[in-house]
Amino acid sequence: MTSSPSPEPSPAIADLPVDEVRHRIEALVARCGPGLPVAHVELGQALGRVLAQDVHSPFSVPPHDNAAMDGYAFDGGALRHGDGAMALQIIGRALAGAPWAGTLAAGQAVRIMTGAVMPAGADTVVPQELCETDGAALRFARDAVAIGANRRRAGDDLCAGGLALARGERLGAAALGLLASLGQTQVAVHQRLRVAVVSTGDELLQPGQALRAGAIYDSNGAMLAALVRQLGCEWVDPGAAPDQPQALAERFTAAAAQADVVISTGGVSVGEADHTRAALAQTGELGFWHVAMRPGRPFAAGLLHRHGQAPALFLGLPGNPVAAMVSFLVFAREALLRLAGCRADVATLPPPVRARTRQALRKRPGRTEYQRAVLRPVAGGLPEVDVAANQSSAVLSAMVGANALVVLPHAQGGVQAGDEVDVLLLDALT
Ligand SMILES: Nc1nc2c(c(=O)[nH]1)N[C@H]1C(S)=C(S)[C@@H](COP(=O)(O)OP(=O)(O)OC[C@H]3O[C@@H](n4cnc5c(N)ncnc54)[C@H](O)[C@@H]3O)O[C@H]1N2
Ligand code: MOO
């Protein structure tokens, strides 16, 4: 009886811990040259863009003391004198946008609406639901309000000359509202970071092509394009590439000529058709390979050289769709935001929340695991997580149904049902 020769044993691969990988990517990012140029865009076009300059408030917001409630403005000092109900005479009306121009004297009040400028001589607003009035005389209990109640101060939101927004902010709805409150029509932002996505693999077809035996559709291309755009970056499409070292190297070089960052998926493991690392080494510099995490163990990063320009960052994500997405969220996201001009505190992965797992989770120490899960609030206690039964990194449907990733740290072993775990909210990562 003959036995087939056993394959050559692969040399052991040192898997880098997740934190070490973060540092190494940071070092690669630092070598990618000067920041992106500045562009001035209309506020309405600035959602998701990165602020390129500090913005100081040219005036106080709000510009004047104003009422926080619909009611009656009066001098709160009067509450201290006398006893029994307060009795005041209504002598005017102030609305938001239509101030009352006079000055209140003792015993007088002004009908006032939320947002209206506080009249001279008034520092307190009594809400109308605590009052009795016939339109001329006003009565309310002396203990209905405290002195100074329901008055919003000028500059409560922003002080004249103060920092309203620091450069490196990702402009979301609240930041855009704040800029509008300063009367700005335009804002200085960085030009969008250009990110090329190269799917690799002979088995890949693009949606629209006829399915043939042995082939699959390129789902990573669409998924990564969406992730890139959700971060406010410009998606560049140099086209998918076959499993051929020379073709890959050429595609990476072409992609680096059109983009600031090149992200590939597939071909980064140890198989005979896995040429990503070799192509990277040929056209640039391999920084590191292999991470102690699951999913996403095969992952390579480095730099692609460009003539007369700073190098482009290269991130080689694994081919399995969930591994590609998790690697993107855990590593690529932060690198892209940094290169896009975001401050470190804006780009860094948001901190996890604590939750209680409803299932026991098996795990061995020595790698970080990210498990797809559904997080639900629990009245009066920690939220609960239900971890998806199928954690295969080829199963994208469990990612669609998930709103969170349970993070099981490097040194930790398995956990029991009911144990507390760290959870990353997927919405916070895009
Ligand atoms: N002997 C070993 N084999 C594998 C290891 C290992 O350590 N030793 N690691 C496994 C892990 S973990 C992963 S993840 C994959 C990653 O492999 P590659 O990055 O080389 O990716 P491929 O082999 O090209 O593809 C893997 C899988 O994903 C599918 N794929 C690839 N690209 C796409 C795409 N754009 N859209 C949808 N699906 C895609 C591909 O068809 C394969 O099924 O390696 C394991 N193997
Ligand atoms: O990255 Mo792989 O998909 O860990 O299984």
Image (spheres, rainbow, N blue to C red):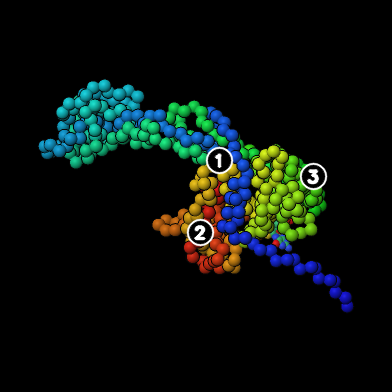
Q: Residue at x 55, y 29 (%)?
A: 40
Disc marking residue 341: 1
Q: Secondary structure at mark 1?
A: loop
Identity of the residue furthest to the bottom in this view: 1
Residue 273 at least partly seen: yes
Identity of the residue furthest to the left in this view: 82
Which corner quadrant of the figure contains ligand 1?
Answer: bottom right
Q: Nearer the viewer, mark 1 or mark 2?
A: 1
Mark 1–mark 3 contact, CB under 8 Å?
Answer: no
Q: Amino acid at mark 2?
A: Asp
Q: Which residue is mark 2?
A: 422
Q: Is mark 1 within 8 Å of ligand 1?
A: no
Disc marking residue 129: none
Picture coordinates of residue 218, whole percent (x, y): 72, 47
Say left or right for 34 vs 65: right
Cα–Cα gap, marks 1 and 3: 41 Å
Cα–Cα gap, marks 3 and 2: 43 Å
Picture coordinates of residue 205, whole percent (x, y): 77, 46
Picture coordinates of residue 256, whole percent (x, y): 70, 42
Q: Nearer the viewer, mark 1 or mark 3?
A: 1
Mark 3–mark 2 contact, CB under 8 Å?
Answer: no
Q: Nearer the viewer, mark 3 or mark 2?
A: 2
Q: Which residue is mark 3?
A: 210
Q: Secondary structure at mark 2?
A: strand
